[in-house]
Image: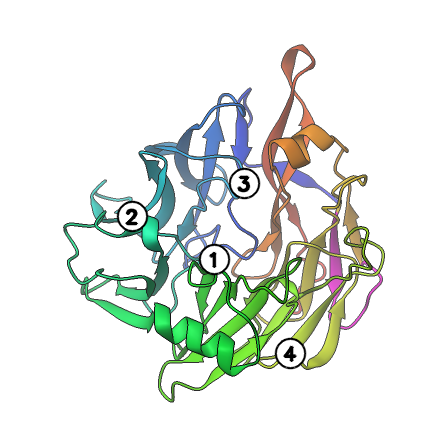
């Protein structure tokens, strides 16, 4: 099956988090990053047409390799990406048509926006770092309306601690410093990864209903979770029997907000994503000691329909934190991912690529 590079050149190219919106809503543009040196933080944000023409740089940021700058589309003209200032993460929302940075907020970014709402989390190190936004006045989870600019506090630090305690878990010093906040498709609930004493390996997954304030917690959560629909998650189930996290027993599944496994969706995985119609699933074999291949699954089948092989390079995958991070196109006909390969002068690099999977798409 053909794999196409988004950009032909000597530099490394990167896509963001698994499940990110690589394409604009109209499917006409792609956002990716270029990096001249994987050992350094300087990273360029680029946009091109879906047919890979008209490449244009829109911004330069400082970030590591893990998830790159997490660049993703919000609308056909608005994008969001991560930067850093004085070693603290900052996310920027930019109009790529005008070049205007509409918002710059010092906080932990999320995966994507839903219904023009972008969630983010604030922990102690970010306090007093957003003088332009006095409403960001304490630790917790916030939601930015990207059209109006209004910021609302979705959950306070005490809300998060109370949620953990009410579900029988013990908070630790990092509990209120949540990450991977994501709104469900309707924007009525927010989930987040939580650190707790009871779950040192996988952590816990919390959820707050923004209308009823009901809470849900999954101890020792499945990993690299995304919303399946408004009320359930999709994620990789992993197992650790005291020595290491197992690759061979991992699989993609659907879960209730309280952790009940509802159905198997695919096989071996770490970072995962699904097509918009939830007929296809993808996961990478990103585990120490294995080539981080990407697998395509039909819903409910643990045996891959297609395998995209990636050369094994432990230094790139783990020291430099370069993960495949599969993400589907909006129409489900492309699978985007990062692929490491040999570069010039014996050096290795990573390439942002896509596979044409239209033969497997339902529509």
Q: Secondary structure at mark 1?
A: loop
Q: Is residue 308 above or below residue 181?
A: above
Camera-side residue: 112 or 360? 112
Q: Residue farthest to the top?
A: 345
| Nearest the eye: 107 or 156 | 156
| Crowd around label 3: few <14 · some 14–19 · many ≥20 (10 Å) | some
Q: Which residue is mark 3?
A: 66
Q: Mark number for residue 343?
A: none
Q: Which residues are magenta?
A: 294-304
> On the image, which quarter does residue 333 sit in?
bottom right
The residue carrying mark 1 is 174
User: How many tags in the picture?
Assistant: 4
In the displayed image of the protein, which residue is found farthest to the bottom?
212
Q: Which badge, 1 or 2, comes first in the chain's sequence? A: 2
Q: CA distance from mark 2 to mark 4?
A: 32 Å
Q: CA distance from mark 3 to mark 2?
A: 18 Å
């Amino acid at each position: 099956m053909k794999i196409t590079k988004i950009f032909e050149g000597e530099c490394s190219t990167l896509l963001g988090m698994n499940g990110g919106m690589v394409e604009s809503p109209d499917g006409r543009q792609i956002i990716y990053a270029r990096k001249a040196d994987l050992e350094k933080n300087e990273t360029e944000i680029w946009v091109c047409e879906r047919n890979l023409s008209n490449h244009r740089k829109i911004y330069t940021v400082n970030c590591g390799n893990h998830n790159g700058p997490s660049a993703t589309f919000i609308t056909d003209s608005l994008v969001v990406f991560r930067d850093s200032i004085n070693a603290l993460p900052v996310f920027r929302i930019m109009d790529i048509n005008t070049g205007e940075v509409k918002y710059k907020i010092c906080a932990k970014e999320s995966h994507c926006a839903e219904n023009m709402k972008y969630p983010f989390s604030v922990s102690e190190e970010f306090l007093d770092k957003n003088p332009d936004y006095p409403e960001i006045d304490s630790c917790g989870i916030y939601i930015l309306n990207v059209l109006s600019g209004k910021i609302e506090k979705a959950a306070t630090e005490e809300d998060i601690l109370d949620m953990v305690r009410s579900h029988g878990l013990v908070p630790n010093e990092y509990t209120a410093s949540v990450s991977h906040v994501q709104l469900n498709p309707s924007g009525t609930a927010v989930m987040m990864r939580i650190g707790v004493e009871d779950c040192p390996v996988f952590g816990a997954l919390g959820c707050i209903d923004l209308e009823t304030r009901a809470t849900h917690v999954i101890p020792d959560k499945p990993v690299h979770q995304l919303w399946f629909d408004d009320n359930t998650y999709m994620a990789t189930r992993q197992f650790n029997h005291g020595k290491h996290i197992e690759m061979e027993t991992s699989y993609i599944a659907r879960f209730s907000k309280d952790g009940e496994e509802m159905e198997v969706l695919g096989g071996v995985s770490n970072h995962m994503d699904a097509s918009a119609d939830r007929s296809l699933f993808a996961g990478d074999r990103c585990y120490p000691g294995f080539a981080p291949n990407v697998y395509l699954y039909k819903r409910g089948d643990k045996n891959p329909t297609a395998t995209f092989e990636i050369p094994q390079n432990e230094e790139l995958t783990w020291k430099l934190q370069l993960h495949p991070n599969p993400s589907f196109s909006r129409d489900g006909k492309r699978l985007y991912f990062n692929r490491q390969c040999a570069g010039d002068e014996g050096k290795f690099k990573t390439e942002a690529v896509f596979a044409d999977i239209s033969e497997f798409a339902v529509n």
